[in-house]
Image (cartoon, rainbow, N blue to C red):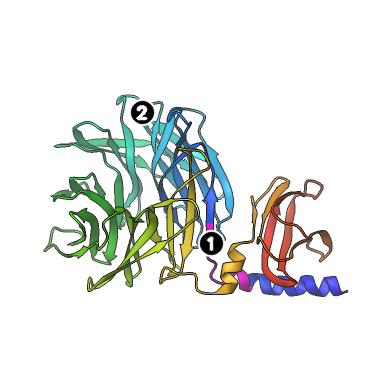
Amino acid sequence: MKTRLYFLMVMIIYPMLMSSQVYYDRTFDIGIIDHPVAYVADQAGNVIVCGWFEDENQENQRAFAFKVNNYGEEVWRITSEETSKYMALYITESGHIALAGSKNNYGFLSLINSESGEGIWSYQDDTSEGFWFGSVNELSNGTDFRLHAALTTNSPHPITYYLFDAESGNFIESDENPGIINDPVFLSGQMATDEIWFACEELIVCTRYEGTGFIWSFNAEHIAGLDRYSPTQGCVVRLSGESIGLLINNIGDTGDVYGEYFDIVHQDYTVTGSGILGTDKILVTGTIDGELAAWFIDHDLSGMSDRTYPSASPRMGVDILGLPSNDMLIMGTENGSLDNETNIFLKKLDSEGLVSTQELAEEDKVWISPNPTSGTLNISGLEAGNVEVSIYNNLGQLLKNLSNTNQRISIEELTNGFYIAVVSVDGEVVKQEKLIKR
């Protein structure tokens, strides 16, 4: 009876827990040398990361993508068996994930199911050897949806993009602008349903659904981000000299451009990616003095502050997102145990760039992966304290009770379905999680 009542309590508390804010710091090992390039988050807090990995000799490049849930727990992972790289991704209106990059040294685009990671359709360009798709976005006129992918390479080349039907993957057309760019397209931003901006280091190209647009050129050592600044304006975040520069321009036309420069008050730094946190902050990430760093610029451009995040293994921020929950997420690389090994980390923080409560900090140290699972779970927990993991079925029956963590647990004997895992530290429940076995 006591077990039954406890299970009912778990079932009541669990939905409340799921809706509360959860902060995490996770590391993911894909290959020997991992290169995370881009990531997106949906309204539920799920995150999809893409990029490529290679061996210790910096050879045998293979594309990857993976999804984590609101707890930072891996849901699925896909990797390619062919020479390939993913360079960009986008969540479409249908909720699927568009992935752009290269396969066998040609431009490659695919659409996958966001729930399972299974492929829906794919397209490989067969005319431009040495090129890849450096960006992907979805354009709409309110009725039809088209995927827009910029074809690019490392040598001087014309501005070229391809259009596809977003549902079927059918090729619609390609457009080649007479202008020549010297650097590859590596970044894009959705400014409106019918307008995107994509960038190389020397310019921004605006493209609209009906085919119009403009080219915007300026000096920059690096463009960290193209973000929607307001309902009617876009923002370019760039590194210029020893400053982070913001340029604000209108969406839909080339109105008056304005902005501000903010001096970086450190001698040793890198600036890599940027994002927008609602109407609160402009976020920038990179490193300061060899440590993971974030800069926070007031949305009204009145000031800038910074914060570093020391870690046991050196980290570099690649990009940073403002989430719908008014939190922020930093994605980047972390040095591994080998000389040139790198892994991927995701660090979710609150709106001030902090994790402010002890409860959330302790919950962050206890997690279960993979979830869903085919039968084996990795239980990771606190280094100190008595950590207990209990697994219940939907009848409230206790199926497993383990007092040691940091080990692999088999639930292969359980039938496919839903279960509840309850994690306690020194007798106090710190986490309840719904498990899926399939």
Q: Is residue 24 magenta?
A: yes
Q: Residue at x 27, y 41 (%)?
A: 185
In the image, the segment drawn in magenta is: 16-25
Residue 364 horizontal side relative to residue 283, left or right: right
Q: Who is closer to the viewer here, 265 or 283?
A: 265
**From the image, which quarter does the N terminus lie in?**
bottom right
Q: Residue at x 57, y 46 (%)?
A: 76
Residue type, mark 2 in image: Tyr
Residue type, mark 1 in image: Tyr
Q: Who is closer to the viewer here, 188 or 232?
A: 188
Q: Position of residue 91 (x, y in %)?
A: 43, 52
Label 1 vs label 2: CA separation?
37 Å
| Residue 106, disc | 2
The answer to whether 224 is drawn above or below residue 186 in the figure is below
Q: Position of residue 125 (x, y in %)?
A: 35, 29
Determine which residue is flagged by label 1: 24
Q: Residue at x 41, y 35 (%)?
A: 85
Query: Does the image show residue 96?
Result: no
Which residue is the extreme one toward the left? 256
Query: Does the image show residue 418?
Result: yes
